[in-house]
Each structure stands twice: as C-alpha cells, then as structure tokens.
Image (cartoon, rainbow, N blue to C red):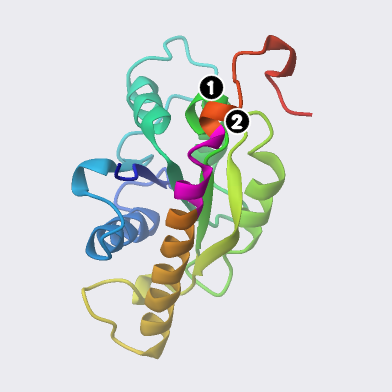
C-alpha cells in the first residue's frame, strides 16, 4: 500500500517562500518514487487560511484539512521564521489538530529563513506543538536558508542550492522510512480513552 503524506506550508502569506519549499518537496517525493501523486496532498495556510481559534464554525477549511490528515501516514511541516518565531498560522493549526489527525505519525520539520536563521521556530514547535496531538517529530530536520535563492528551478544554480537539494532528498527518505515503520502503531495504540485524551 502506497504511503500517504501531507505537506503543510505554514505561512499565512499567499505565494510564500514556505509554499514554494513545500511544493518543491512534494515534487521530489514524486520524482524519487516515494509516493503516488494521488497520495500526496499540500495544505497551504496562505492560500486557504484557517479561521482564528476559537471559530464559530469548524467546518470548511478545517474539515478539508482534517480529512487529509486523518488519512496521512506522515507530515512535512514547513515553518517560516518570523522574528525568530513560528508563524501564528502554524500555532493556530495546532490548536485545531488533535490526536485523530496526527497521533503517532512522523513529522519532518522544515525551517525557512530569508537569511541565516530558521532554527528557532523548529525548536519552538518541538517544545510546544506535539503534546495533545501526539505528532512524533523526526530527529532529522531541514533548514532552508537564503530561501529566495534556492529551490527555484529543476536544477541547482550553485553549490548551496545543490547542497540543500541533496539534504532534502535525504530527509524525505528518512520520513518515508519512519512512516512505513510507524503504520502499525496506529492500530496498536487506542485513541478512544477519555482518561488519556491529552498529553501530560
């Protein structure tokens, strides 16, 4: 059975660099033969924003996201760095997302920075976003620095571009192996116990 993966572009800006990176990674998953096109989904919080929690209506955009996430075997989460922090759109996403959408699924964190940063949002997300949803972040992560000058075409334009492309392929391969290995966990671990609905 083919793996199903979701890529999440975490910027609230339309046509963002985060969306560009997510689309590049989606193409690479296809080109490397890790997934079929029908089994890859891209959620762009800039193109389809979620209402600020708490919203009167949890349908619409969230219902579509939740349906994709429940079927997924893993997640690629692309985070921009705004003032050294994860974006409000991503933090809002994790208020919506619960264990039924993300529980015991591997997540590859991808940082995006216009300069030499990008690490702080990933540390923030590792510290504060997994508790109730039970998303399992990989020890591997990817940081795309000087993002405007890399991952723009089908071929690398310089050594830095080539290096991040090679690292991206490696990280995606790691995610795929975790996704395959962790599939049985979601049938072995029950999610229906009210006593342990939230993390500690």
Question: From this viewpoint, is residue 98 visible?
Answer: no
- Classify 195 as above or below 128: above
Q: Is residue 98 located in the magenta-colored stretch of the structure?
A: no
- Classify 99 as above or below 124: above
Tell me the magenta residue range: 178-185
Residue 43: quarter of image: top left
Residue with the most extreme bottom position: 159
- Classify 68 as above or below 121: above
Q: Is residue 115 left or right of residue 62?
A: right
Q: Nearer the viewer, mark 1 or mark 2?
A: 2
Task: Check the picture and name the quadrant holding the N terminus.
Answer: top left
As measured in the structure, the alpha-carbon distance from the residue carrying label 1 to the one carrying label 2 is 16 Å
Residue 148: quarter of image: bottom left
Write the residue at 42% across / 63% down.
173
Number of residues whose C-alpha sits closer than 10 Å to that of mark 2, classed few (under 14), some (14–19) or many (20 or more): many
Can you give x and y, in whole percent of width and height, for residue 186 in the image? 53, 31
Q: Is residue 127 left or right of residue 189?
A: right
Number of residues whose C-alpha sits closer than 10 Å to that of mark 1, classed few (under 14), some (14–19) or many (20 or more): some
**Residue at image mark 1:** 53
Could you tell me which secondary element the residue under label 2 belongs to? loop
Residue closest to the eye, 179 or 115: 179
The overriding secondary structure of the stretch rendered in magenta is helix
Q: Is residue 182 located in the magenta-colored stretch of the structure?
A: yes
Mark 1 or 2, nearer chain start: 1
Q: Is residue 154 left or right of residue 131?
A: left
Task: Check the picture and name the quadrant holding the C terminus.
Answer: top right
**Residue at image mark 2:** 133
């Amino acid at each position: 059975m083919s793996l199903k993966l979701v890529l999440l572009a975490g910027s609230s800006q339309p046509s963002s660099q985060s969306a560009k990176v997510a689309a590049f990674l989606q193409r690479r998953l296809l080109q490397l033969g890790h997934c079929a096109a029908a089994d890859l989904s891209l959620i762009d919080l800039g193109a389809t924003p979620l209402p600020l929690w708490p919203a009167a209506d949890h349908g619409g955009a969230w219902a579509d996201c939740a349906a994709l996430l429940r079927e997924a075997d893993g997640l690629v989460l692309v985070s921009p760095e705004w003032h050294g922090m994860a974006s409000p759109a991503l933090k809002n996403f994790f208020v919506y997302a619960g264990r039924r959408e993300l529980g015991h699924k591997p997540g590859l964190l991808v940082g995006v920075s216009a300069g030499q940063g990008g690490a702080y949002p990933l540390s923030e997300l590792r510290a504060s976003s997994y508790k109730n949803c039970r998303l399992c972040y990989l020890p591997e992560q990817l940081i795309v620095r000087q993002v405007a000058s890399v991952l723009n075409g089908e071929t690398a334009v310089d050594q830095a571009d080539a290096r991040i492309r090679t690292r991206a392929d490696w990280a995606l391969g790691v995610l795929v192996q975790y996704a395959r290995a962790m599939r049985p966990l979601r049938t072995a671990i029950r999610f229906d116990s009210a006593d342990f609905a939230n993390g500690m």
